[in-house]
Image: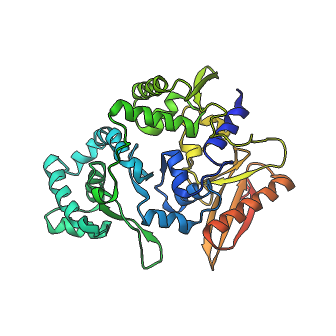
Amino acid sequence: MDADDVVRQRLRQQQLRPPRAVSAEAALKNLLAVQSQEFAYARWSLAQRTAGASAADVEQAVADGLILRTHILRPTWHFVHRDDLRWLLTLSAPRLHRGNGAIYRQTGIDADAASRSARVLGAAVAGGAHKTREELAGELQRHGFEAKGLGLAYLIMHAEISGVLASGTPVRSTSGALKQTYALFEERVPALTGDPADRPAALAELVRRYFRSRGPATVKDCADWSGLTIADVRLGLGRSLEADPGVLETTVLDGLDFHFCPAGDGTAGPDVEFGGQPRIDLVQCYDEYIMGYSQSRYFLGGTAPARPDGDTPMHVVLRDGRMIGSWRHVLAAGRCELVIRTEQDPGPAGNRAIDEAIAGYGTFLGVPAVRAGVKLKGHF
């Protein structure tokens, strides 16, 4: 296995190449969890792994509760399928609470405040009464909580991590943007008989699904992505291989052990060819193709995620799976304009591939999409 093999397999297993997922929720089941603090772009991360899901399709799956948006794994937003949230939360909650400990103390969230606020929040959303953050703040303030700023954010996050709140059906703001709502966890998240029976079994499930959807990858990649310890990941890997010795294969590359899904198990599609017509992917800066790795992110061939610098776009342009530039979009007058910046001139074939990728993005949004310009680094 060489670097090209790693890139090819990651593109396949992440479903950025065939076989595509049949729906956004199926793409999410494959990836297990998808970072989603930028809701608009996180919709695209799921849809571009399908045969043609639209922004509206993803929004409907969120409204129906098939896809939930909550704090899990690391202390940031993730999309999780409702069938996976309960057991993932069992794994994540203790470490998330410990990691939030300093801010809990700073904002006065002790055991008593957490318990009282959980009762208020749970009662507020019971019976399908989904509420926005502002509405929950009002409920908390009526019961004596200041519920502003950081304190409000962490009271709500504490309730999410504690299995009190889950995401509800989004509502439209006066500007037309979708706003997150919250629902009662027990009304939104089913208890399934097929959930992992105990913590070691849950670790094995997480590790197996991580490497099958993101491999080839390292133990440290998985630990950093999941928020778990390296020891936990190794325990899960051992349990997974003990249950099914052929579920994963291992190779050594750059002096590191890489674990991946074996060929011929039915999950891999046709080989991803390099060297012919280029393929451009416009992925968001927090896409799992980027955030799914830490130790071995260097196969991306560029630096991401990145912070915006003035007019510099921060989302990532991939050519055959490797970073060649960045992009952003602007919605105006019923259309979407995309600014593309590349490190080098993409050439005629590369520009055609960029145009195809832009057209696909417009189809996803349901509006015409046009290129505002392909600009070289340093010429913005």
Image quadrant holding the C terminus, namely bottom right
Indicate the quadrant where residue 304 lies: top right
Q: How many marks?
A: 0
Query: Residue 84: percent from the left, percent from the top?
Result: 41, 47
In this rendered view, identify the residue nearer to me: 130 or 347: 130
The one nearer the camera, 239 or 130, is 239
Inspect this view and state whether residue 190 appears.
Answer: yes
Front-most of residues 248 and 146: 248
Q: Residue at x 41, y 50 (%)?
A: 83
Residue 66, compared with residue 300, is above or below; it is: below
For the rendered model, the colour scheme is rainbow
Q: Is residue 147 left or right of residue 48?
A: left
**Residue 343, horizontal then vertical, whole percent:** 74, 48
Say which of 72 and 247 sits in front.
Answer: 247
Q: Quadrant of the N terminus?
A: top right
Question: In the picture shown, does residue 217 fall above or below 183?
Answer: above
- As displayed, is residue 129 above or below residue 279? below
Q: Is residue 146 visible?
A: no
